[in-house]
Amino acid sequence: MRLDAHDALKGYQMFVFALFLAGHPYVRDEDFQEFAGQLTIALCGSRQQQAIEYQTQFNEYRDDISMLSRLIAIPIADHLTSGESHYEDREFVARFIPMFTITTQIEIAREFRDKPTLRFLECTMQEILQGMRLGHS
């Protein structure tokens, strides 16, 4: 179970990175293939193929954030509940996927020293957290 959740998270990070780079060209086109390969090795180690399979699956739902959040939540909820997750568990985990997405983007922007994007993402994270607090008041 742990490997499925781990592979899913790594695949999702690669998915987020690919989409984020489309709007933030930190890497020159001619260097992108090599960079992506090195990133995949660094991020996934020997489990590259499994993470890439998840990334491909997530890419199919890139235009449906609700479905995408649920899809990534399944292996995580299964891991947290020792394989016994139910709909409610998955929905609970899915609520945190936007925070994981923003956190991944923050780390990318920080690594490339993109201060304007970093400030924007940090503000977005604060809005998400504020919304979560209001939802539980």
Image (cartoon, rainbow, N blue to C red):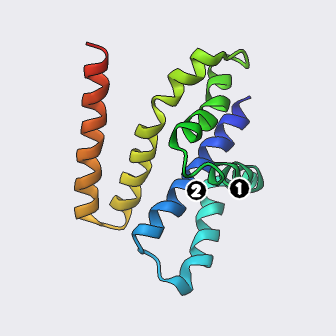
Which quarter of the rendered picture does the N terminus lie within?
top right
Mark 2 lies on residue: 14
- In the displayed structure, does residue 88 sit left or right of residue 130? right
**Mark closer to the chain start, 1 or 2:** 2
Q: Is residue 8 above or below residue 119?
A: above
Name the spot of residue 62 as percent of width and height, x first. Answer: 57, 52
Mark 2 is on which residue type?
Answer: Met
Residue at point 28%, 45% (across, down)? 124
Can you tell which quarter of the image residue 88 is in?
Answer: top right
Q: Is residue 99 above or below residue 16?
A: above
Q: Is residue 28 above or below residue 120?
A: below
Q: Cβ–Cβ below 8 Å for labels 1 and 2?
A: yes
Can you tell which quarter of the image residue 87 is in?
Answer: top right
Name the spot of residue 51 as percent of width and height, x first. Answer: 70, 50
Name the spot of residue 76 as percent of width and height, x first. Answer: 62, 30
- Label 1 Cα crowd, 10 Å radius (few <14 / some 14-19 / many 20+): many
Can you tell which quarter of the image residue 23 is in?
Answer: bottom left
Mark 1 lies on residue: 52
Image label count: 2
Nearer the observer, 17 or 22: 22
Q: Which mark is residue 41?
A: none
Distance from the alpha carbon under mark 1 to that under mark 2: 8 Å
- Looking at the rendered structure, the secondary structure element under dot 2 is helix
Residue at point 32%, 25% (across, down)? 132
**Residue at the far front in the pictured view:** 64
Residue at point 58%, 41% (across, down)? 68
Which quarter of the rendered picture does the C terminus lie within?
top left
Name the spot of residue 117 as percent of width and height, x first. Answer: 28, 61
- In the displayed structure, does residue 61 sit left or right of residue 1? left
